[in-house]
Every structure is written in structure tokens, then in C-alpha cells.
Image (cartoon, coloured by chain):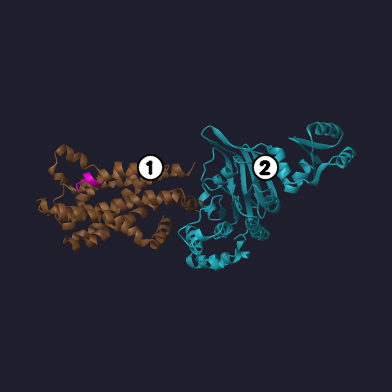
Chain colours: A cyan, B brown
Amino acid sequence: MEHIHARSPEREKTVLKIKGLRKNFGTRPVLRGIDIELVKGTCLGLLGPNGAGKTTTIRILLGLVIPTQGEIEVFGELYPESIRRVKYRIGVVPQMDNLDPDLTIFENLLVYANYFKIPRKVARQRAEELLEFFALKNRRNEIIQNLSGGQRRRLLLARALINKPELLILDEPTIGLDPQARLLMWQRLEALRKNGTTMLLTSHYMEEVSRLATQVIIIDNGKAIARGNPREIVEKMLGMEVIEFSADEERLNELAQLLKECNVETERVGTRLYVYIKAGCRELDEAASTMPHVVKRPATLEDLFLKLTGRKLREN
Amino acid sequence: MFRVWYRNFKVWLKHLQASLIGNLGQPFLFLLAFGFGLGKSVPEIEGMSYLQFIAPGLVASAVMYSAAFEATYGSYTRLSTQGTFEAILITPITIFELALGEILWGATKGLVAGLIMLATLPLFGVVPSTWALLMVPLLFVEGIIFSAFGLIMTAIATNYDFFNYFTSLVITPLFLFSGIFFSLKAVAPALRNVLMLLPLSNIVDLSRMLCYGRFNQTMPIELELLIILGFTLLSSWLAVILLKRRMIQ
């Protein structure tokens, strides 16, 4: 899929630059000053609990939400004046499946190409290539209603690529998919990334973000609370490994007391104690060998995410 | 704008049959019941048989029903359940183009319904004059008005039931009181002036005039055209504004 590459060499290496972005819905602030920078050829993951402001940020980029305050520059052009020109160069996989149910797979791509003023002949050729790449070729004349969830998602991604976008925006691209279908999506997305497609990704699947994103920003309550390379920020903010102890309260209290000597961070959740290890510690090793229910594993983005945004359910 | 229109056209071609029968059924039934049935016992109006009198107005009503139906149930489905509007708005198509494309599409469907109705009038013994060719632009403009009305409703609707208000409080009264079934010349002048301010009255009046090439319209042509133009611009403008408010936060 070499054609996904940028059409012209951009003088600007920064594809997207957002400064001090704020949005209030009525009196309720959704974004409270967010800065984002996305470098060409990289994939930036926006993480956050429901209602954190990820989708609002994306909708602002697409002109579907008017920001209250803030500066936005895409491909070196300032919003809102440039928004229409910019959108010719963006592809979007929306969270909600909004494929055209009355049209076939192939027609979906052609009708969409028409919105980008892509000449018919070029559109047909690109549609064929995309269907091939996304393993949908033998279903090209199928009506959308007859497709599986995975096929629909692949078609949404194919549709987003019909204009050879220089920036691909993925809002929860694998939401609701089974593991096999998700794996296939990831493989395709990885192939695109290797080809240098710049991506902005939001997701709730930490594995997805760890796999695809080169940079992440964790957003909570409309503010960025952490940012950096996913592996580096986990190491820096949590440590390399996590040990999970499960025991009764008394036992865990003792243990927490003991570990105060160590250079570790601990977190109590019910009958579990999470210990994030930055450096080795004798007390910890001893405890690990005497306690019955112990799990030791590498620290993940999910640990960091839960640590920063809390383990409580987010519901408005 | 035409890209949005084209998408709808392409889908429509797939459901041609159901769509046509659905929209034309009612005006045809009225033509049969009132023209042939009731018409037999009604004296001539303005020098025409009752069937002749109501036929052009029923053509105009077919346009109204078809355009209004498309811009409410059709557009609302694209706005809500299908998410088509959103899918379009994430491309370079603007909300302005989307709204106008939807209005033009509703108007197109209205025009098609009206023209089919007009073309079948000879079967009922009603023969239009060559002036009737000018009904094409008139009916298209009518389509724009009622398509825009429908889109206004779509922009403020929260569910399909909402359109019941529109049908029973706007469309049905217009159908009954716009001079399709009785002559507005015959009502008291004060009432006539009020009724002639309704969007459909002038179109019915001009349709009847063009259909038979008899220039005995109710008010001066300039005034009737001005009212039609006013409704066209006002309703389209309002539809764009309200759809923008609905789609862009």
C-alpha cells in the first residue's frame, strides 16, 4: 500500500499542533486546556476514561464541534479558516458505524470518494486496491447489512483511506470486535504505520495503544495528565514490574508497612495490593516468597492508566 | 451539494417502485374519489368541471407530500439511525452543502411525483395546455419549499413521532385550505387574503393557471411569485441554520 504515503513532501514535520484547547458544553467544561503535537509518520494515542474529552478533541479537528478557546494548526494551516482544505487530506474511522446500509461495499467506497471529488476512474481503481488489502474483495457487491462486525470495521478503515489521507484519525477503531477480527485490524493498521501514515488514535484497549502508538497522551477530566512514549512513561512513572498480592486486610497492612523501606509505589484496592517496582528490594523479595497469592508481571500501560485515572467506574 | 444529492439519488434508484407508489397513492385516490365520485354532483367551478378544477392542485399536493415526506422520514433516518449526515460531515462536505443537497433532493423527489401525476391526467380526461411546461420550474420551487419545511422539522425532531405534528398541523391543513378543493375567489375577501398567504395557495393557483393556460389567477402574478420566492428563501435559510445547530456543537 505504498500509495498511502503523503502526496507531497511537507516542509512542516509537525502534522498537527493544538495549543490550549478548551471546550465548554453550556457551563460544563469538557476540555480544559489541552496541548497536542503530532509528528509526521508517528502514531499518537489519546487515552482516557469515558467522558475525558478524547472524542470531543477529534470532533473539533473535524469541525463538528466549535472550540471555546485554543489554537489548532493542521498541515501548517490555521483553523478554522483552513478546515475545509485540511479535510481533503484527513481520513477518519468513526466510533459509530455509519456505513451506508442501502449501498454495497463497493458503492460505499465510490460514493465516499465522490465527497472528496476523486475522479470516478481513480476512485474505482483505489476502491479495488483497498478491498484487496482489507480482504473484502469477494464480497464487493454485498449489502452492508449482511456483513460481520469485523468486515464492517475493515470497510470503515478502507473508506477512511479512499482519499489517501496524510493523517488518519482512528476513534476506537476496534470497538466491539472479537479477538480475531481485532487482530486482523491491528495487522492492517501496523502495515499502514510502517508505510509512514501519520495516525491519531483513541482507544480503550491498552494493548492496542501499546502496539500501535509511538506517543501517548493520557487525558482525564479534560486535561492531559501524562504524555510520552508508552514504554518510557510506564517505566518512568511506575517501574518495570508489578507484583500483585492478594491476602486479607491485616496481612496487607503489615506488608505495606514493611515495604515503606523500599523504593516502590503501592496501591491498595480491596483485598489486593499492587506494588510497582522501580528498583530491587530485599523486603519485597522475602514477602513475595512467603505470601501465598502473588503475581509478578511486567508493568503495562493499563497499570499506569488505572493508577492515574483511578479504578472507580466513570459514569455521568 | 450535488454530491449529497447524488448519494440519495443512487439509493433511490434501488427502491424505485415502493417509493413511487407510496408517494403517488394518496393524490390519485383523491382524484378518483373527488373528481369522479363527488365531481358528478358538483356544478362547474370557474368554468371547469370539478375534476378539471382539482387536478392541478392535486398535482401540486403530490409534490408537497413527496418532498415533505422525504425531508422528514428520509432525512431523519439519515441523520439519526444511519449516521449518514455525520459520515458526510467528516469529509470536506460542509453543513451548508449537506443541507442544500438534502433540500434539492427532496425537491427532486417532489418534482418527479408531480410530473408523473401530471403526465397521467389525460387518462382521466384532463388535457393540459402547452403552458403546463412552465409547471416544471414551479413545482420544483414548490418542492424546495416543502423539502426545506421538512428539513426544519428533521433538525428539531427527537424521534419519528414528532413528524405527526408536522403532518397534522401543517401538511394536512395546507392540503385542505389552499384552494385545491374550493375556489379561493369565492370566499370572503378578508379570509381570502389570509389563505393566499399560505405557501401552497399561490402554487395551486398558478398551477391551475398554467395547466389550462387560463390567466384568471386570484392575485397579480408578481405578488404570487413574490410570496413563493419569500417562502423559498426563508424556509431554506431556516433549514440550513437549524440543521447546523443540530449537527455542530
Q: In this view, does A309 lie to the left or right of A144?
A: right
Q: What residue type is labelled 2?
A: Ile
Displayed quadrant of residue B5: bottom left
- Element type at mark 2: strand
Bounds of the magenta segment: B175-179
**Pointers 2 and 1 within a single chain:** no
Q: Is the residue marked by circle 2 packed among few (<14), some (14-19), or many (20+) residues within 10 Å?
A: many
Query: What label does residue B162 carry, if any?
Result: 1
Instruction: Identify which residue is drawn at 71% across, 45% down.
Output: A302
Instruction: Please state the horizontal and vertical placement of residue B105, each as a whole percent of the image.
Output: 37, 55
Displayed quadrant of residue A8: bottom right
Q: Which chain carries label 2?
A: A
Q: Quadrant of the N terminus of chain A?
A: bottom right
- Main SS, magenta region, reads helix
Query: What label does residue A218 carry, if any?
Result: 2
Q: Which amino acid does label 1 sit on?
A: Phe
Displayed quadrant of residue B132: bottom left
Instruction: Find out whether the residues at labels 2 and 1 contact each other: C-beta distance under 8 Å.
Output: no
Q: Does the magenta stretch include residue A64?
A: no
Up the image or down, B201 lies above or below A131; here it is above
